[in-house]
Each structure stands twice: as C-alpha cells, then as structure tokens.
Image: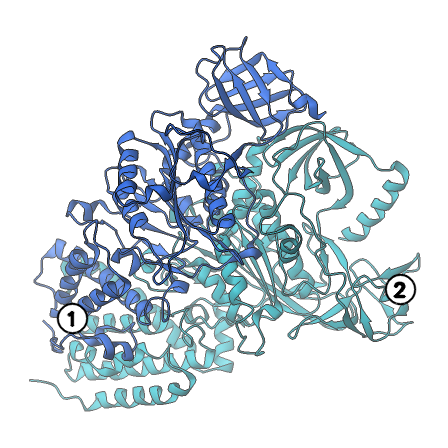
Chain colours: A blue, B cyan
C-alpha cells in the first residue's frame, strides 16, 4: 500500500479557489504533502485536507494560478509537512514556505520536524515566572510580560504596533541573567515597507544575527500564510527546547492569517460561523498560540508576541476575541492616545497580563509592585470616569479630590505611559515614577496599598481638607 | 439504566457469535472519519481507528457505514486502514487512584504519558487510567453470606490522606456475597469479593467501568437545603450557591473567570473537587498543578490535591477529546457522590465544549442552528447540568451525596445574548455575570451585582439566620437596595452633575462605595483576603451597617457627608478583608470605637 503513495498522478479533476481535487487516487493520507508540478515546470507544495478511497482534496500553498486539469502532475510524499532545522538558521531570511531568500544556500539540516508539532503535555509544563523587563512602563508596571507567555498586541490600522513590537524585541531582558537569546519573526501578509522596517530595526540593534525571519508579504500567496507561522514556531521550538535558547516569537499579522483560513473554508463550502470565519478557528488559533511556554527540566523558553489589527478597532471582532480567550492577556493600543501624540499608545484599562502575578513581587521585581499596580488601575479608571463627566458638564461640579484625580490621570498618560521609542526604563524607574504619581493623591485614597509601603514610598502632602465643594 | 451490565453481556455474546470484525476507513476530514463494513456496531461505541489505533467514537450510523469522531490528531490516517471495534461505549475507569491524578479528556493519565512518551503528547500514547501496581490497604465492610444490593459499601481503602474510598457493589448487581477479602494489601485488579447473583458467581475487583454519556443511577433526587460556602463574600452573601446546585459564570476574556473558578476550587466546602480545564490554556493548568498540591485546605489541613481530580484538555489538544472531557469529569464526580460525598465540579469553560460540538457538527455537515451551533446544543447542556444535584443514594442505609456544578461560559465579545450563555441560563439556578468594566478598574471578583442572581437565596438566607446571625437577610436586602439606588443616582449625576444631590443621596453614595470597595471587592492573591468564612463575613457586615446607622444619625444633626468621608474609620473598613486572624479583633474593636465616636461630632458652623 505504501508504495502507492509515491505514485505520481496527472489529471486534476477540479480547481476552485486555493483548492484542487484529484480523482482516481488511492491510499492518500489525511494531512500529507503533495508536490504539484505545473505545466510550466514550476513546483508548488500542497496539503491534503480531505481524503476518501478514490479522491483527495488538496490546498495549494502558493495559489492555484496556472494549474490545469490536463498536464499538472501531483506527487504525494506520504508524510505531513516538515521543515529542516539547524542553529545556522539564525541570521537567515526565508520566504513563507521556508525557502531561503537571502541569497544564501539551503539549510543543512541538523534535524527534520513535522511543522504541526505535538501538544506539550500539560504535566510537562513549567509555570512561567521570570519577568521580562521590556523597559516600557505601561507594560512592565501594569502588565508585566513573563518568559513563556503569549501576549498579543491588539492594534488598529495606522497605529504604531510595529514600532512597539520592535522596541520590545530590542529591549527585552531578564534582569541579572545573561542567557542565549533569539528572535523568530514571522510575517503574514504585511507590506514590504513594514517588513523592511523590522529588518532595519533588527540590523541597527545588532539583533539580526540572532534572528530568523520568515516573510510572507502582502503580495505573496494568501494560502501560504497557513504554514508560515507553523514553520516559525517549529523553528522556535527547536531553538528553545533543543538548543536551550530563550526565543521571542513575533507573529504579524494574525488577522491576515485568519483571512486565509476563511478563504479556504469558503472554497470548501463549509458552514460559516461568526463573520464568515469557520467554526474551528478557535482550535486552529490555539494550535499556534499554545506553542509558547516552558518545559520542566529544559533550559529554553518560547515567548510569543502576536500582533493583530482589529478591523474597525473592534475588540469584539472574532479574531481579537478568540485570541484573547487563548492568550495570557493582551496589550491594547488606543487611537485616542495616538491622536494625543502619546507613544506608546497603550490603553492600559483593557490590557491584561495573566501571568503577571507569578512574575512580580519580592525577589523578582519589587515587593510593592502588585499593590502599586492595583492602585494605579483604580485611580486611572476613576480619573477617566471623571473626565467623561467633565466633558458633559464642565469642571464646576468637581470636588477638590476629583480635581486631583484628573491631574493624576493626565500625568499618568503624559509621564507614565508616554516614553520615547529608545527609552529603556528599569522596573525600579517605573515604580519610582508610579509613586511620584500616586503621591498626587491624598494618603487616605491609597486603599489598595498596605500602610507599610505607603510609609516607605509615599511622598505627597495631605493637601486635601475634609470639606465639600 | 443498567447500561454497564448490558454492554458487558452484549460484548460477550457478540464476540462469541461473530468473532472480531473490522471496518475499513473510506474518508478522513480532520477529526471526523468515515468507515464501512461497520454493520452491527452501535451508536457511541468506542473504536480504534487506523494503523495507529487512535481512540474514536461512533456518532452516526447509516447502513453499513459509520461516522467516527477521533479523539487524537488524524494526520497520516489513510483510507483503507482498519477500524477495530471494542463493543463498549466510551467509558471511564473508576476506582482508587483517581484522586490527585491529572487526566486528559478521555482519561489518559498525563503524568504517566509524560513518563512514557516525553514532553509532547504523541499520537497513540496510552496508559491505564488507574495505577495497577499500587497496593491499597483494604478494609472489608461486609461479611460473606451478606445479602447486598447495588450501591452497598462492601469495603473501604484509604485513597489519600483526605479521602476514604468506598468500594461499592456496581449498579445493576445484587445477590449474596460468596466471598470477601480479608483486611490486607491489594492492588486494584485483585478479586476482593465474589458475588452470587443467582445466575452466576461474579468476581468483583476495585475497578468499575462506566459509560461517560450515561448518568449513574440514584434512588431519588432531592432538593438542595443548604448553601455551598465558598469564602467569597459577594457569592456567599449576595448570590449563594447551594449544595447540589448549578451555577454559570459568563464573562468576556480578562474578566477573571478562571480566577473565580480556581478560588472556588480552593475554598468551597465540598469534600471532593473535580476541576475540568476544557479547551483552556496550558500555562494555567501548569499553575493549577503547581499550586494545588502545596495549598493547604483550611478545614482538613491537607493539600487540596489530596481530594481533587484534574482533567486537562488544553485548547491545542484534540477537539473531540475536549468534547468528551466534561462527560469524563461528571462521571467521576458521580462515582464519588455515590460513596456519599459532596462533590463540586468546575468546568472551565463550557463554551469551549460547545465549540467542540459545533466544530464536529460542522465536519458532519449537519444543518446548523443558531450561530452555527448544532440544534442539540441546548439539550446537551441540559443533560450535563442535570447530572448535578443532591440525591439519596442506592444501597441500603440512608446515604446522601451531592454534585454542585459551576460552569464558566466565555461569550464571544462578552455578549450574553449568544446561544451558549442563553441556553445555560435556562438551566442553571445561579448566574454570576462578570463585567469587563469592573475588571478594567481591577475590581475583583468582577461579578456585577446588578445583573447577577441566585435562586438559592431563600435557602441560604434561612441557613445564615439559623447558624450565623439573625439580621443577615435584612442587611443583605439593604445592601442590594443601596447598590441599586447608587446605580440610579449615577444616571442622574451623568445628566445633571453631582452638586445638585442632597446630602442624603451623598450619604448613600458613600455607603455604596464602602460596600463595593471594602466588602464586595476581594483580593484573591492576598493571604487572608482570599477566603472569608461566614462568621467573619457577618462581622464585617455588622461593622459596616452599624456605621451606616450612626452616619444617618450624624447627618440628621447636621454633620456633612464629606466630613464623614474623611473619618479614619473608612480607611479601616478597607483593611477588614486583608486582616489576619490576630489583627482581626483589634481592628474590629477600633472600628467599633471610631463608629461610636461619630456621636460626638459637632456641627461645624
């Protein structure tokens, strides 16, 4: 039976969108890889999506243009998609199907792996605890990133998510530790300019030689985006768990990835779910995002920063929505702050880092970190609420305490959130800044901070009298 | 009802008359496989698919053809490969050794798989669900010659420091004990009793099998009569759950569903905890695994993991196994209930389970119902939640057990009008609505007090008044009124501004603020705030409401609300939750003194 698998077939019976159907085949396995030779001699790769005793449906990664039903030849490899891996991949650039596009030769494999991987046994996982200092206050102070976490950036068209991602990649470090560090970058349908920006950034910061790039640009075939992130993540797993490196994976833009999934679902005439996306999109995204983490007894780690642009800035759109349910929090960028000229325009209220709790505190960042964060959140939320009141009825109705909260809110945005794209603040800098801001408020308002810390760090004055307006 | 017995008998008969008969795969699409040559197989029969022997279950039969959902990744499965029948429905193995173990959705022990197969779960990995080599000390609870019936306790082993595991006569069997093992060390596969049923002499071991999709039988279902205390103030006081009750926690992502579920798992006063991580994050399960064995239960002083079973089918593990995970969990829960335990089951999240149904339904090209979910969504949800309840058990004696189910729901976009939330709400009796706005302000638990409800409030109220304090119901009602009124006032402020409010309304806002920030808000990661027992809850309420009545009196004598707001006692309220048992008395005494001192405030002219 197995030898049948390597038989070459001609005679494609149907081509629709990114899919082609072959009849009269035999013994084709689900998920196996097909090499498709076009009449012009070009070879493309495809994958079996559905197989019956005599028929196979194949998705063609670099598109079905120029396929014909007479001369096109298809050879089935009898195995799922694999990638050749080597630590020499660091510093190299590949296309979305892992072919070198930097003029260098092919990778001499140290090992070959299935790109779909296998799920990490939950019993093998180590709970991530090493906090990463990104040097960005709105992240370090409010939503600390931890090694092994997957923390996406929810952005919108035209917002500086690329600048932020490159700043994180450049500045990220675990304090007091010098370890092997690598970046794996996977572009899915971003423009040439955006990708050039990243490459330049990596080059300038000297990170390029520790970076592996997989580029599927906007004019590359959309269906290839299905495999690009999996190639990147398989590489990252190899570097992290075989070579003991701490790997930061930047995936951009997941919205394009989901569009590609939707395209295939539509071509297969599947029952559409919300906004036409297929019903299995949660499971599919999880198979990417869950490939982050740490494994007990192994050196390395995979930290993921997926970037996605929310269509119409809508956080309830299926792509950000499902992502938020899988990832360990999210960094949300705001158009309002961006318009005010604040970089990075991180809207801290809807942001979250679920692994922060284990990564901060004494011995990691600082003992007061958790309480300071909670207090900043509640004070900023209150300031924002008051500002929306002021917008309706002016400042007259405000008490003097309310005014302090508004002052806090403004300074929080201008001093704490705002920073330069090359400004690298330590955890200590960030927390000191936080206490400067909290000291605007009267001591009695700091209900979420224990008296000991207030005694240690608070340096404001009791300027508020107990009198009403 | 007597499924187990019937299936076993049938397996016997068919194997004898027909011999092993295999089907052949004719189509593969994702987790769904079709095979022919399957005549004679039954719905929901468990099968082994392909050369790799992947575990699957028959979900459609049509003539000679069967459609099978496969619980493992199907990449590489090829038409022409065999499908081997097992003649049994998808079942779990029940017996000593469940406690403290982490399983995937189809009861494969993950620690064992880790030892055998390495860090990744490879296809076709398997290991017996229960450890066959571990010896347990067996204490017989019956003698030979005794007449026993289904559900009777015939023996007991100590499964963990917290759990006595009773060996029961399996449902469907009764007769005379022909033999029972003496006290001693046995492995679970040893014969510990021989039952003479009249037809045959049946050897019993400590293992039972039970099909996951069938509820285990009980004698009678009973109404819940007491609250299930959780140590979470907003839940116990305002929206209580009952022993044997059902609750849903819907909320958008980031609103703290998982933290609430974990808090409940840690602190709920049930004897056995079943925690199902259904399609959730791997790192979270790692956290649970790391935390729960070290976490001391305040009642027994033992680790939580000594009375807990964990089921982890993370989002990247096969989707069909995710669909099965809630059934696996509830069947294990029923097994412990049958021993007379109070069991609490947390399912995080039922939406992922519903999505697994949708995904498989989509692959079957079924006619979709609302939002692509299959039309049987609501009946499946109902079937699941109906397996909760307080019951009177089979067997002689008047034993009682209960299962309380708490299901998290993850509505897309936080929109509660979606089908999973709505269908769940039609069944459950308690609704804890999580609110993104509260979460953004870091008000946790982010349970919205205006939207949530509990139909067990009357039952719980009676219990509180009988056991804790006589004016509980009055304070609780007043609390709800204050919070409701605050909401109305905020509408007014939004329209006309705060300066027009009369002093009495300002006082109400102050009251609401104290209730929200010092009582309803509870910090899960604080050593002491994480759990508040009923006595302390009552004490806190009492302190707050005493202050309220003093404040009202002061207002009448012309003291302004902003003066009251500046009193040090307000700050003390915020420290009530985090106070350690030693700090508690001095703190409450100082609050009482400060509250008393309000009497002496003089009007400032």
Residue labelled with disc 1: B502
Task: Judge the density around disc 1: few (<14), some (14-19), many (≥20) Cα neighbours within 10 Å.
Answer: few
> What is the CA distance from the residue labelled 2 to the residue labelled 1?
80 Å
Residue A44, percent from left and from top = 49, 21
Circle number at residue B252: none
The residue located at (29%, 81%) in the rendering is: B572
Taking the image as shown, residue A415 lies to the left or right of residue B283, namely: left
Taking the image as shown, residue A171 lies to the left or right of residue B321, namely: left
Residue B39, percent from left and from top = 78, 32
In terms of depth relative to the viewer, which is nearer, A79 or A373? A79
Instruction: Please determine whether, in this image, residue A355 is positioned above or below residue A436.
Output: above
In terms of depth relative to the viewer, which is nearer, B570 or B91? B91
Instruction: Please determine whether, in this image, residue B594 is positioned above or below residue A414.
Output: below
Residue B541 sits in quarter:
bottom left
Taking the image as shown, residue A47 lies to the left or right of residue A263, namely: right
Residue labelled with disc 2: B194
Label located before the other in sequence (2 or 1)? 2
Task: Judge the density around disc 2: few (<14), some (14-19), many (≥20) Cα neighbours within 10 Å.
Answer: many
- Given the image, what chain letter belongs to the residue carrying mark 1? B
Q: Is residue A92 visible?
A: yes
Instruction: Please determine whether, in this image, residue B586 is positioned above or below residue A216.
Output: below
Q: Secondary structure at mark 2?
A: strand
The residue located at (44%, 39%) in the rendering is: A88
């Amino acid at each position: 039976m197995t030898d049948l698998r390597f038989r070459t077939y001609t005679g494609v019976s149907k081509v629709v969108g990114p899919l082609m159907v072959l009849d009269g085949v035999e013994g084709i396995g689900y998920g196996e890889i097909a090499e498709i030779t076009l009449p012009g001699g070009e070879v493309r790769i495809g994958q079996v999506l559905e197989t019956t005793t005599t028929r196979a449906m194949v998705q063609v990664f670099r598109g079905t243009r120029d396929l014909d039903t007479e001369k096109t030849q298809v050879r089935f490899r009898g195995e799922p998609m694999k990638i050749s891996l080597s630590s020499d991949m660091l510093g190299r650039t590949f296309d979305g199907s892992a072919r070198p596009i930097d003029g260098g030769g092919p990778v001499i494999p140290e090992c070959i792996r299935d790109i779909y991987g296998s799920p990490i046994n939950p019993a093998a996982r180590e709970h991530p605890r090493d906090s990463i200092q990104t040097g960005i206050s709105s992240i370090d102070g409010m939503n600390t990133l931890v090694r092994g976490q997957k923390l996406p950036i929810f952005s919108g068209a035209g917002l500086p998510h690329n600048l932020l991602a490159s700043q994180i990649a450049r500045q990220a470090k675990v304090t007091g530790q010098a370890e092997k560090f690598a970046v794996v970058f996977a572009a899915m349908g971003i423009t040439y300019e955006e990708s050039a920006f990243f490459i330049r950034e990596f080059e300038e910061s000297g990170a390029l030689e520790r970076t592996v790039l997989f580029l599927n640009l906007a004019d590359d075939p959309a269906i290839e985006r299905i495999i690009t992130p999996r190639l990147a993540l398989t590489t990252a797993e190899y570097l992290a768990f075989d070579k003991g490196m701490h790997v930061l994976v930047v995936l951009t833009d997941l919205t394009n990835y989901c569009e590609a999934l939707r395209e295939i679902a539509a071509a297969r005439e599947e029952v559409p779910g919300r906004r036409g996306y297929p019903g299995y999109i949660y499971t599919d995204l999880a198979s990417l995002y869950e490939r982050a983490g740490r494994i007990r007894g192994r050196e390395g780690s995979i930290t993921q920063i997926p970037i996605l642009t929310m269509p119409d800035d809508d956080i309830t759109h299926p792509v950000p929505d499902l992502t938020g349910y899988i990832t360990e929090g999210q960094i949300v960028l705001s158009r309002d702050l961006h318009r005010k000229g604040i970089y990075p325009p991180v809207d801290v209220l809807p942001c979250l880092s679920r692994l922060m709790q284990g990564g901060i505190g004494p011995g990691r960042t600082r003992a007061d970190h958790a309480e300071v964060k909670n207090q900043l959140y509640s004070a900023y939320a209150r300031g924002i609420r008051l500002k929306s009141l002021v917008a309706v009825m002016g400042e007259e109705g405000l008490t003097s305490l309310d005014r302090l909260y508004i002052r806090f809110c403004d300074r929080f945005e201008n001093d704490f959130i705002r920073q330069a794209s090359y400004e690298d603040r330590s955890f200590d800098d960030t927390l000191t800044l936080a206490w400067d801001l909290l000291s605007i408020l009267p001591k009695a308002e700091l209900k979420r901070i224990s008296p000991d810390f207030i005694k240690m760090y608070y340096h404001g004055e009791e300027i508020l009298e107990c009198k009403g307006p | 009802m007597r499924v187990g017995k019937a299936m076993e008998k049938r397996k016997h008969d068919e194997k004898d008359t027909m011999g092993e008969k295999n089907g052949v795969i004719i189509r593969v699409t994702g987790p769904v496989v079709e095979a022919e040559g399957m005549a004679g197989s039954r719905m929901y029969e468990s099968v082994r698919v392909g050369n790799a022997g992947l575990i699957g279950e028959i979900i459609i039969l049509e003539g000679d053809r069967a459609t099978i959902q496969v619980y493992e990744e199907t990449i590489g499965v090829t038409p022409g490969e065999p499908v081997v029948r097992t003649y049994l429905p998808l079942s779990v193995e029940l017996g000593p050794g469940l406690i403290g173990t982490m399983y995937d959705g189809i009861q494969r022990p993950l620690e064992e798989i880790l030892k055998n197969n390495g860090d990744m779960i490879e296809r076709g990995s398997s290991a017996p669900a229960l450890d066959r080599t571990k010896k347990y000390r067996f204490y017989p609870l019956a003698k030979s010659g005794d007449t026993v019936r289904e559900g009777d306790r015939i023996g007991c082993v100590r499964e963990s420091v917290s759990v006595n595991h009773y060996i029961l006569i399996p449902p469907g069997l009764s007769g005379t004990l022909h033999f029972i093992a003496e006290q001693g060390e046995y492995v679970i596969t040893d014969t510990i009793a021989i039952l003479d049923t009249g037809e045959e002499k049946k050897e019993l071991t400590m293992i039972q099998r039970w099909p996951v999709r069938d509820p285990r039988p009980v004698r009678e279902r009973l109404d819940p009569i007491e609250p299930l205390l959780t140590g979470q103030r907003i839940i116990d006081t305002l929206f209580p759950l009952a022993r044997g009750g059902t609750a849903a926690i819907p909320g958008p992502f980031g609103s703290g569903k998982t933290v609430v579920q974990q808090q409940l798992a840690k602190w709920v006063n049930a004897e056995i905890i079943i925690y199902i991580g259904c399609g959730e994050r791997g790192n979270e399960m790692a956290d649970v695994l790391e935390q729960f064995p070290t976490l001391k239960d305040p009642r027994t002083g033992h680790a939580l993991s000594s009375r807990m079973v964990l089921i982890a089918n993370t989002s990247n593990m096969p989707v069909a196994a995710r669909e099965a995970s809630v059934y696996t969990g509830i069947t294990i829960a029923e097994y412990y209930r049958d021993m007379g335990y109070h069991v609490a089951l947390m399912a995080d999240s039922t939406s992922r389970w519903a999505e697994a149904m949708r995904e498989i339904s989509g692959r079957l090209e079924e006619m979709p119902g609302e939002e692509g979910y299959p039309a049987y969504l609501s009946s499946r949800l109902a079937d699941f939640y109906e397996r909760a309840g307080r019951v009177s058990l089979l067997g002689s004696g008047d034993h009682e057990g209960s299962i309380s189910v708490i299901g998290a729901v993850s509505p897309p976009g936080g929109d509660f009008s979606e089908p999973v939330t709505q269908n769940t709400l039609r069944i459950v009796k308690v609704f804890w609505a999580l609110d993104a706005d509260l979460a953004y302000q870091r008000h946790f638990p982010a349970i919205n007090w205006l939207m949530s409800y509990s139909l067990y409030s009357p039952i719980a109220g009676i219990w509180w008044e009988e056991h804790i304090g006589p004016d509980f119901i009055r304070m609780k009602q007043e609390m709800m009124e204050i919070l409701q009124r605050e909401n109305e006032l905020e509408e007014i402020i939004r329209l006309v501004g705060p300066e027009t409010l009369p002093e009495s309304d300002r006082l109400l806002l102050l009251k609401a603020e104290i209730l929200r920030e010092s009582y309803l808000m509870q910090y899960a990661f604080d050593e002491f705030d994480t759990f508040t027992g009923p006595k302390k809850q009552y004490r806190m309420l009492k302190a707050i409401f005493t202050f309220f009545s003093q404040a009202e009196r002061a207002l009448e004598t012309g003291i302004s609300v902003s003066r009251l707001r500046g009193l040090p006692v307000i700050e003390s309220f915020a420290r009530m939750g985090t106070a350690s048992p030693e700090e508690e008395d001095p703190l409450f005494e100082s609050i009482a003194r400060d509250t008393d001192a309000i009497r002496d405030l003089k009007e400032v002219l």
